Amino acid sequence: MVTLRPAPASPDAGKNLLAEKFQRLLATVRANRPQDDLSLIERAYEFSLKHHSGQLRASGEPYVLHPLEVAQVLAEIRMDATAIAAGLLHDAVEDTSVTPQEIATIFGEQVAHIVNGVTNIDKIQFANREDRQAENVRKMLLAMVTDVRVVLIKLADRLHNMRTLEHLPPDRQESIARETLDIYAPLAHRLGMGKMRGELEDLSFRYVDPFAYEQVRSAVEARRQEGEKFLRGIENALQERLKEHSITARVEWRIKRLYSIFLKLQHQRITVDQVYDLLAVRVITSSVQDCYAVFGLIHSIWRPVPGRIKDFIAMPRPNLYQSLHTTVMADGGHQFEVQIRTDEMHRTAEEGIAAHWKYKAGGSPVSAKDEQRLAWVRQIVEWQREMTDPNEFLSTLKIDLYPEEVYTFTPKGKVVVLPKDASPIDFAYAIHTEVGNTCTGAKVNGRMVPLKTRLRNGDIVEVTTQNGHTPSRDWLNFAKSSRARNKIKHWLNEHQRERAIEIGRKLLEREARKYKVSLAQFHDTDYVKVASEYGLGNTPDLMAGIGFGKYSARQTLNKLAPGATAPPVGPETTISSMSDAVKRVYFSKGADSLTVEGHDELLVYRARCCNPIRGEEIVGYVTRGKGVAVHARNCPNVQNLLYEADRRISVEWARLPEADSAGHRATYAVKLTVFCDDRAGMLKELTAAISDDGTNIRGVDTKAGTGAEAIVEFIVDAFDVRHLNRLVNSLRRLSGVRDVQRQQKL
Ligand code: MN
């Protein structure tokens, strides 16, 4: 099972061993791909030898032995010289000072591209995966690579690491073996590489479940002699009949692999005593016709076990595996499985995707073909899915044919699959709704990033949250997953409605005060009655309707207490009294036009503590009874308001600055404090600079500074932040001006 190679006794022995291994590699390439360019492989080996020199593996052997063995695996599966060279260099960028540029310069873009692909996969930490995550990781691996040779090198790399796993500490052994079983063996299976899969599984089995491994191994060992004797008898009988019928075919037999026996024992709930089911005979023919002939012949000698006949020639498996399978009963009730296939089918079964490389001559450009092959690999994955879960198949088919998914990780290595171009917000909602709702920021690969950042395959995402923080409507601009979008919308709707209900009540109260109507006299049934007149079900709906401006507070009051209010002027419209109020209070002044997102009819005013001006980032805060106070986002009070975060709402400046009837644009009073030299003419220069800009000065005040410093305070009218910044900069440029500060409070 596990092939262990003795460590070299001396440096010289190490050198000889390396030279021997390299010659073996060249011989394998010559045998499998006679046309390939050996010089590329030779140069790659020399390079690897040089750059890994002095490095040792855990086994104490020279490090370069590892890439050499990886290359050997690749050569044995008939990979081309490019892949073998990349295999020799696969750890060079990660473990030595070599740069990807260097690889590209010396070995060409293709080799560099493949080495890069392997390095990128190596960067991902797969720690702590759960079973259901494995599928995602496998998909991600395929999504990440643009050249399938990257996957094959990764598999060869893993195979050699598994072969030498005994040199690592036990805890690492188990986790690496688990990962191999979860990720790499199934990946090999998907690529149709039966031999690779089998070896990876058996090597892992030993470390993942040592107890079961030992049980199966000893049970098989105990029955090996008997089994082999039995199989030799079968072989002889079969050969004889083949000869009689003039069929040329090769007969092979083997005891099945330990891990597949283990799975079978688990699956079929049989005991190791039924060892004959663990025996397998394979007949390899030269034509499909002969396959069926042998199939018939076998059933004429031994009785088939019902339900065990499978024709994978007519119906190939998704990974292109073809074979006839049958299980037959020999004398004494001993069962054994027979697989019948052609030479070509056999190669496909053993080597899978790698088998498709073998006819291609080396040296020719392959990039376009690679793309096709990769599409083919992905196709295989999809076909395979079809067998297990049709629903999932459909969704993944869509995804992988049009790469619509991005695979990201939590810091603990859990895979989070998101739609393409997803943001950290999507990630946060994928973790948990509460995490999404309270998300304040994100780190990607350890670095702080804006929440609108587009995530890429392999990104490790960490979300920061803050209790009381709430979703923002902005998030809908970059949230891609339907889950995140629905959650955000749901939250916004819920909370907007709550606010609208509150505003509606306030408006009704105000209207009632105005007309001296006591609301205390009304019961819920009175409100419900009015609500039903509007086609609404209950009181909150009615209040929300008023708050959203659908129904006027005055009309509602009139319905509650008929005749209490003066008859409305003109026909009743859907414009709410609140929107009237906003117009009356603010628009008439021509300034302060703010909108509350989605509700331009809400009562809004600028908070006096920070006096935000157009263009500044702002947040709204629903006050009790006074409408919405608008603060600058950086206003210190905003932080203090967070304890009632559900009263916080998104606000934005109305799109167009309001102009009054004379066409004058609205301005905002801003207080500026200028720290400057205390000298004659300074004040004049300052005021000149301000008025030269066309800015109105509302007031000026001078204060004594310290020593030779004067402090001058201006209140100026600014159109917006841009105007203000321009003004501040022009003041700062004046000689003698030390600093200019804006005072939020007037
Ligand atoms: Mn490696």
Image (cartoon, rainbow, N blue to C red):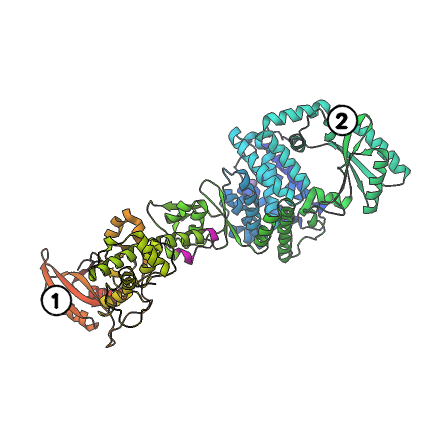
Q: Are marks 1 and 2 in contact (CB under 8 Å)?
A: no
Q: Residue furthest bottom?
A: 662
- Residue beneath disc 2: 227
Q: In the structure shown, which secondary structural element does the residue marked by tag 1 occupy?
A: helix
Q: Which residue lies furthest to the right in this view?
A: 244
* Whole-number angstrom distance, CA of label 1 to CA of label 2: 107 Å
Q: What stretch is highlighted in magenta?
A: 475-483
Residue 305 in view here: yes
Kindly identify which numbered label has been placed on residue 633: none
Report the residue at 31% width, 71% height from top.
Answer: 571
- Residue beneath disc 1: 683
Q: What residue type is labelled 1?
A: Leu
Work out whether residue 654 or residue 362 is closer to the camera in this orientation and state it. 654
Q: How crowded is mark 2: few (under 14 residues within 10 Å), some or many (20 or more)?
A: some
Report the residue at 12% width, 67% height from top.
Answer: 683
Question: Measured from the top left, where is residue 61 in percent x and y?
Answer: 57, 33
